[in-house]
Image (cartoon, rainbow, N blue to C red):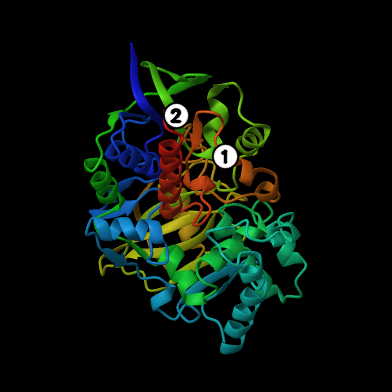
Amino acid sequence: MTQSCDTVIIGGGFAGVTAARELSRAGQSVILLEAKDRLGGRAWVSELGGVQIELGGGYVHWSQPHVWSEITRYGLSLVERPYYTSTNAMQRTRFLRNGALQAAFTPEEAAEIKAAFTAYVAPAREVFPQPFQPFTTDKVKDFDHLSARDRIDEMPLSDLARDTLLRTAGMQCNNAADAGGYIEALRWYALANCHDETYAASVSRFTLAEGTKALLDAMVRDSNARIELSTTVERVAQQDCGVTVETSQGAVRAAHCIVATGVNVWKGIEFAPALSPEKAALSREELSGKGGKIYLRLKGRFEDSRWSALGGAILSVLPHVIGEDASVVVAFTNPEHPMEEVTLERLQAEVDRFGAGLEVLDFAFHDWVSDPHALGTWGNFRPNQFTRCFRQALQHEGRLHFASGDIAQGWRGFFDGAIESGLRSARAVLAAGA
């Protein structure tokens, strides 16, 4: 069966849904194709022990203008998670390094850690003076070749400061510190107006009280697009007069096509003509996010603001919902030390390393790295990808346009970036006309 429309969109995450809403409200006929049996992409609301959890992305903040506009538009609200931003992280923490557990930091150690982070992100404003317009200067070329570890290694640091920065870098790039580009740390900090509290709050303090699905559903209700789930795209062919998208369910012919999947999966689609060398290289190399996010339900009250570790399978643990009888926490795994199998026993062994005496009752996660429709977590560039690939990744190729939180100009790797990218691609299609 062959269908026809003005614009066909590949991918039903926030970028694709945003583009579908904008184009259909502008009067276009739109078909949105999603390989999964649900919309949302790397956003997925679930539950654990009666507590709502976000198996994929989940954090939002008013420093992120595109998602905040949508939250305001649909009358949604925030819930604050019990993180370090509202507690004394230096006194209510467990930091495991070199086999030793540190339960608190002295004022002098806390000042040393803060000074190290300040020095680490010091070039942010110079490199990204207008962070939503990342090509304003060429200063990024001075740093893009560096991994996060490269930058940390060249800094004069104590062992404690170095270890805390490595933990921060691993969380930010969701991989080993040598896999993540240093400029991504500068970008995050510049987007938060180079302000420590705004930075911390922007990346992990608030989630939607109603869940990300509530926002997604509201956007879908505002759209007239036809949605086709469980439809895998196999080939995208351009002709002078339009685009033909061949899928597992048939074909769709359209004047324009928006590819709204993550960057990592572009290489799994046959494009005719082939994608530009820069886009192909970006997809082949993949972005840095290769860790995991596991929710644990623990027996009893989680007393700390966070746990952190180097050298183990779990990089960080943050409280999600704290209760007297049971608490739900979210653990971010360390790709340098992957768990061969995620089991209750394996997770209990990791939790035991922090010496809190808490029992793991249950857990929930989704393996985004092995998911063929994701092949990774949030979008952060590796060294050199910004200068080699990013500018071209934003460009249309004939009647093909590209939208993804992975290639956002601002909050890349966040919902805000996906919405920004969806808006940009929709405007480009409307400007192109028939």
Q: Label 1: few (<14), some or many (≥20) within 10 Å?
A: some
Q: Position of residue 274 (x, y in %)?
A: 61, 24
Quadrant of the frame with the N terminus: top left
Identify whether 278 is placed above or below 70.
above
Q: Are discs 1 and 2 less than 8 Å apart at CB?
A: no
Of the residues under marks 1 and 2, which one precedes in the sequence? 2
Residue 395 badge: 1
How many residues crowd mark 2 within 10 Å: few (<14), some (14–19), many (20+)? many
Query: With respect to residue 359, does 256 lie above or below?
Result: above
Q: Is residue 295 visible?
A: yes
Circle 1 SS class: loop
| Residue 355, visible in the rendered structure | no
Name which residue type carries label 1. Answer: Gln
Query: Residues under labels 1 and 2: Cα distance?
Result: 13 Å
Residue designated by label 2:
257
Q: Position of residue 403 (x, y in %)?
A: 47, 41
Q: On the picture, is 215 further left or further right than 341?
A: left
Q: Residue 434's x, y, as percent?
A: 41, 27
Between residues 116 and 323, which one lies in front from this camera angle?
A: 116
Q: Residue 33 falls in which quadrant of the image?
A: top left
Task: Residue at 42%, 54% (x, y): give it.
Answer: 416
Q: Amino acid at mark 2?
A: Cys
Residue 161, horizontal then vertical, whole percent: 66, 74
Identify the residue shown where x is 42% and y is 43%: 427
